[in-house]
Amino acid sequence: MLLSLKLTPIQESNQEPIVVNDYRLFAFLVQVPYMPLTGALSLFLLDCQSRRLTRSTLAFYHDKAGRFIMWLADGDITHLESITSVHIKRYMVSLRDRGLTDHSQHDYARVVRTFLAYCIRGELIAKSPFTRVKMPRVAEDLPTVLSDEEIRSTLQRVKLQRNRLIIRFILDSGVRASELLALNAGDVDIDNGVVTVHRGKQQKARLTSVGAITRKELKRYLLSRGSPDAKAPLITTESDDKRLSFMGLMSVFRKMQHESGVLNLTAHTLRRIMATKSLENGMDAWVLARLLGHADLQMLRKYVRLNKQPVVRASELYSVVDSLD
């Protein structure tokens, strides 16, 4: 009997992904002449688990690859060998027709491409139908950043000490939301500000840092909690001093948006501000990439586009109209 996958919308990154452990099924699948799509998905997820991808990444692949397979099943396409480039293109058009954003459409297409690339690597098919498909374009709008005045105003209006610390900590360190929540009290050196991120993206550890003001606020926050030991969570709930969850952090940011009136106040916006301001202040791009946890400079391109100083200097030096006077 083939594996039947129950797919439900995944609302939070810490939801448990599918666990594939029916090895008798796999022994059967590698011998069948026509690979059922549900079986191919099971093998794909097993491969992801064997590579120790994070729970959020597994859930991401499970959800989006599963939805592609369900869409195919609605068109009576149930075997891997039956997928063509036309099917993939029609699926991408259906995503657009559903009103998904450019980035969401790109995410779905990327998962389909990754799934089919695995099928080649796993010798389930000889050639990927995605080779004749181009990835959907993503509009390159300028990302949103907050002005210095908006940041100061936000810090004045946010009431809870913990919440102000969250803002300052991300602005200084550039850590991702998931990385902040995984930090323990002992991961921050109060004396020099060095922050050890043990569970970064793709499970890569790195060092970043926070400044003197943030360290002072952090020390006050930890003292208010009775100076917890090194293994205690760095950021906790207000009610029971337990580690703040991802959904809890989202709730915190919604509350801060309401208090400050800044609707685009998010953890990622703060991380983006850290990158942009660091470049404006003259930080070396490779150092910034290291602090943010990027392996190369590719991801910094969007932050370079937000750096206003080169544009202002160019206008001052080379303005065509000014040169006419």
Image (cartoon, rainbow, N blue to C red):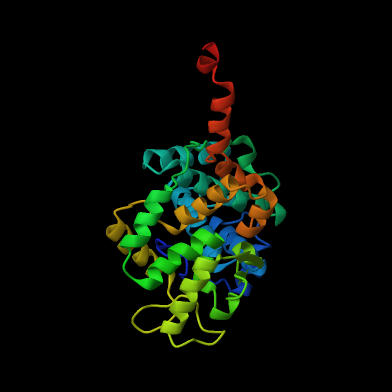
Residue at image coords 33%, 82%: 239
* Quarter-of-image position of residue 236: bottom left
Q: Residue at x 50, y 65 (%)?
A: 169
Residue in front for this viewpoint, 310 or 34: 310
Residue drawn at point x = 52 percent, y = 71 percent = 215
Residue 18: image x %, image y %?
51, 69
Image position of 147 with respect to 217: above or below: above
Q: Is residue 168 above or below residue 238?
A: above
Horizontal side, residue 208 vs residue 259: left or right: right
How many numbered tags mark residues here? 0
Image position, residue 312 (x, y; %): 53, 32
Judge by depth and name the residue closer to the eye, 220 or 13.
220
Q: Position of residue 84 (x, y in %)?
A: 57, 40
- The answer to whether residue 171 is seen in the rendering is yes
Residue 289, x across and y down, in percent: 65, 53
Answer whether residue 6 is visible to the viewer in this image.
no
Apparent side of residue 276 relative to residue 75 in the rendered image (left or right): right
Q: Nearer the viewer, residue 37 or 325?
A: 325
Q: As rendered, which of 126 and 58 lies closer to the eye? A: 58
Vertical order, 321 against 178 (above or below): above
Going by the picture, which residue comes out furthest to the front? 325
